[in-house]
Image (cartoon, rainbow, N blue to C red):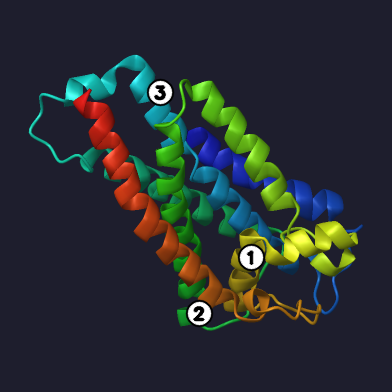
Amino acid sequence: MLVFAVLQPIMFVLLFSQVYGGAIAVQGTDYTQFLMAGIFAQTVVFGATFSGSAMAQDLKEGLIDRFRTLPMSASAVLIGRTNSDLVLNGISMVIMMLTGLAVGWRVNSSAPEFLAGVGLLLLFSYAFSWVMALLGMSVKTPEVINNASFMILFPLTFVSNAFVPSDTLPLVLRVFAEWNPVSSLVQAARELFGNVGTAPVPDIWTMQHPVVTVLIGIAVMLVVFVPWAVSKYTRISAK
């Protein structure tokens, strides 16, 4: 997992910036500046899936059964799993930023805004880890959660404004991308890192106020899925 967390972001940064950078034009900025926020968002979203596959694997191997006799909180395992995702995503962010700096990416905002951007990405990934942890406890095998997360998250991250401006997409895909929560996360990161350029922003509330939108989404995920996941784990461990 640690090797994947280190190599995957390097691969994506180099692949998109060096292979596609010369073929995709973005109004008001170069493609590398536009790209990096999308790579950050994609990586933390995919990095949040480890909790789900790990919980499914723990259930399959009977590890949860061994915890029944221990004097521990029902939320301890889930907190440990989701925090491990947060650590891996933090490592990935550092590696991606260093790689991005090497290929020409720059932060064009203040230090507080930069830190706010990093914090927003990591907080979103932490909240999404609880969603995936719940799904991991709801499936029969780890293979199911791995395949399902790929089938859902791959189009969710690519049909967005992460890699191309949403106004260049066909109508149906453009509407989906503009209301895609990943697009709001990417746009918020671009604004906080100062990489927006002059590309037109869709005239909808979620894209005009992306930071607020993402914070609302994070709050909803935490309020709904943390107690739901803990309740699910309590029922499973009591069987």
Q: Position of residue 165 (x, y in %)?
A: 81, 66
Element marked by disc 2? helix
Q: Quadrant of residue 235?
A: top left
Q: Are marks 3 and 1 in contact (CB under 8 Å)?
A: no
Neighbour class for label 2 at 10 Å: few (<14), some, many (≥20)?
Answer: some
Residue 213, numbered circle: none
Whether residue 210 sits left or right of residue 50 in the image: it is right
Q: Quadrant of the C terminus?
A: top left
Q: Residues under labels 1 and 2: Cα distance?
A: 15 Å
Q: Determine the residue positioned at 84% across, 49% down.
A: 19
Element marked by disc 3? helix
Closer mark to the observer between disc 1 and disc 2:
1
Whether residue 204 sits left or right of residue 116 in the image: it is right
Q: Position of residue 119 (x, y in %)?
A: 44, 67
Q: Is the residue 16 above or below the residue 132 in the image?
A: below
Query: Hey, what amino acid is under mark 2?
Result: Glu
Q: Quadrant of residue 229?
A: top left
Query: Hey, what amino acid is under mark 3?
Result: Gln
Task: Tell me the residue that label 2 is attached to.
Answer: 113
Whether residue 167 sits left or right of residue 145 in the image: it is right
Q: Is residue 179 visible?
A: yes
